[in-house]
Amino acid sequence: VEGNEALAVEEELRAALTSAGFQWVLDQFDAVLVEGKPEFRKRERFLRDPEEVVPADLTKKRGVLTSEPYSPQERLELLITAIRRITVEPAEFEKATVDLLIRQERVARVQWVDELGREPPRDASELELSIDATRAARAQLTETLDLLSERVP
Amino acid sequence: LSIIPTNQQLVQEIAGLIGPAASPALATASQGDDLFEGFLFALAVDAADSIGAGVSYEDSTGTQTTSLTLRTSPGRIWSTTPLYTHAVIDFPNVDSLEVHVGVFVSGRSTVAHECDVVIIDRTEAERCRRDFVNPRSSKCPLSVEAKFYSTPLGIGLGREFSGLSGDLSASLSMFVTNTDGASVARLLSHRFPVGAYHPHVTPNTTASDDFRGIVRKVLQRYRAQ
């Protein structure tokens, strides 16, 4: 995937996330882009702040921490990873939480309840059902994301 | 003959799968945090169990229960609508502790801060429920700031944690995330002790074992004192 194509693919993934209700993922993504990619730059001479807590030797060895813009390919890779995180990891967290608590045999039921009632209670048993129901789609999505990721240099 | 899909076809397939593959429990960023906090709560309880502590669960009226109700937004330790659950950790000859998800804790400035997962002296927690006040952070052996993120962490989160920890007097304040962030790691590594920053904590990983290990050490130390 070349530079311009990576940006075009990013646009399409943005649209897909927005229409699936994941604007918050794009907000996090945009914040990362604004901050830029952390990068150490080595310089023969560097000015230290007298209050600096990082030892001078370390700065000399590693360089000064700065940032630079992500390339279109890096942006795309970040977005692919973000999609993977929001689709694969939650199911793993739900399952692990229930497994850990139920395994101790002191817990029969786990539910999440909003104090202000802004959303309906979520029961772990329902979450387990949803994990099963979404498993096939998750597996297929993971495979497709991997394929796309392999094409990003 | 296999047909290699074009990039366009892959993107279309991904677009069609995001909705069906996503957990319904993840419509907002805060719901991701709920899942993550629940997982860390379970790991903390498991750590207590692994060192032979007695573990039980009760609601905010002190009634034992096997049905856990966890918070999805920060709240007061004494709230009874609904009846939220906490874990009780018992040691022989040592005061008991409680593990809570998402309760307010009072800092050095007396301002209330949300602690995503927190271990509190049981005597302090009982007093707070009785007197309708927030627990003092000095009575917390451990407080955890949990961040479930889809991307690397921005420095703002490290800055927030740094400020928060400055006002909390918990024995150990930890920043735990499912992802990472180079600037956050650098900031915290120069300002906090080893064990304060836990990146990449996801199920069945070395990172989640490390987190559980630190909680175990905190509890062992508490028991020994």
Image (tube, coloured by chain):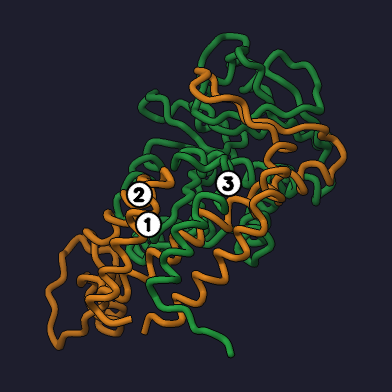
**Is residue A102 at all visible to an observer of this figure?**
yes
**Chain B, chosen colour in render:** green
**Chain A, chosen colour in render:** orange
Which residue, given by chain and number where applicable, does mark 3 sit on? B23
Q: Position of residue B17 (x, y in %)?
A: 52, 57
User: In the rendered structure, which amino acid carries the disc numbered 2?
Assistant: Leu
Q: Quadrant of the C terminus of chain B?
A: top right
Q: Position of residue A41 (x, y in %)?
A: 21, 80
Q: Chain of mark 3?
A: B
Residue B69 in which image quadrant: top right
Q: Chain of mark 1?
A: B
Q: Earlier in the sequence, mark 3 or mark 1?
A: 3
Which residue, given by chain and number where applicable, does mark 1 sit on? B153
Which residue, given by chain and number where applicable, does mark 2 sit on? B157
Disc 2 + disc 1, Cβ < 8 Å: yes
**Is residue B225 at all visible to an observer of this figure?**
no
